[in-house]
Amino acid sequence: MLESKFSTGELKPVSSRKTVHDLVYEQLRDALMSGAFEARKTFTIASLSERFHTSHMPVREALRRLASENALSISAAGTAYVPAITAPELRDITLARMIVEGATARIAGPRLTEADIAALEQILEHHRASASAGNNTEMTAANRAFHFHIYRAAGSAVLMSQIENLWLRSGPYVRFLSDRMSELLKTERRSGFTDQHAAMIDAIKSGDWDALGVACEADIRASQDLLLEILATEDGARDAS
């Protein structure tokens, strides 16, 4: 069994010098980015308060904050829920991710060291091992760890904030794909999920920063295309039934 090395979005009781509101917000935000919640998942303040061992107020404020970032929606009754997934929004988020993340990877390239390359290769191997083991959660966590290791090297708090927000809004799509990954890992697609990550490492080693950005963009686009294919297939199956 693979031991988790990365953040998987698991919610835990909070206790720290940080404010309780901040800790609740950070854990929920991380969980949403990790695809821990499926589309249309609703959140009750009472259940989350019990999960975090907190009062209702910090949970309520965290949900409002996430709604302001478009990570959650609020119903007319005041219930917070994960937005539904749609093909148009997926295309829009993907376009933004390719622009911002591709540019950030190009900026990060010259700053990456031999130690960074070694770390990325370790993450890639963990990603491959997770795929072979059919461990969807670890695959998702390794993918995020790989990308963010590169993006942090750019040294831009502004770009990182934009990227995190885009990943936050991508959470329902990450979960949607993860839920279907077990079947995909039984097909010939299994060996291709890390191809662009390998290409990114090769570009870093060769000092080709444009190739690094292109491989990053191709990785993001590949996920979109796979999601659109699954969405179309499932929509067609529902229409036929």
Image (cartoon, rainbow, N blue to C red):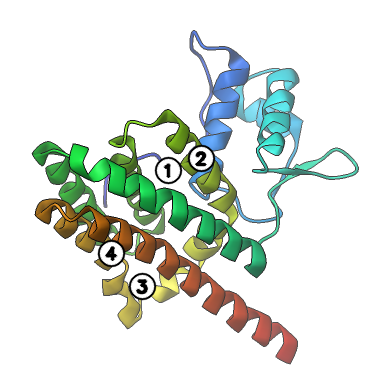
Spatial CA span between label 1 and label 2: 21 Å
Q: Is residue 140 above or below residue 222?
A: above
172 sits to left or right of 98:
right
The residue labelled by disc 4 is 196
Q: Give the amino acid at mark 2.
A: Gln
Give me the disc on residue 185: 3
Asked where in the image residue 206 lies, by quadrant, the reply is bottom left
Nearest to N terminus: mark 3 or mark 2: 2
Read off the residue under disc 2.
162
Per the model, the C-alpha gap separating discs 3 and 2 is 31 Å
Q: Earlier in the sequence, mark 1 or mark 4?
A: 1
Please identify the residue farthest to the top as the structure is shown: 17
Q: Is there CB contact under 8 Å for labels 4 and 2?
A: no
User: Residue type at mark 1?
Assistant: Thr
Image quadrant where one finds the C terminus: bottom right
In this view, the mark in front (4 or 2):
2
CA distance separating discs 4 and 2: 22 Å
Q: Which residue is mark 1?
A: 8
Circles 1 and 3, Cβ within 8 Å, touching? The answer is no
Spatial CA distance of label 1 from label 3 is 19 Å
Label 1: few (<14), some (14–19) or many (≥20) C-alpha neighbours in 10 Å: many
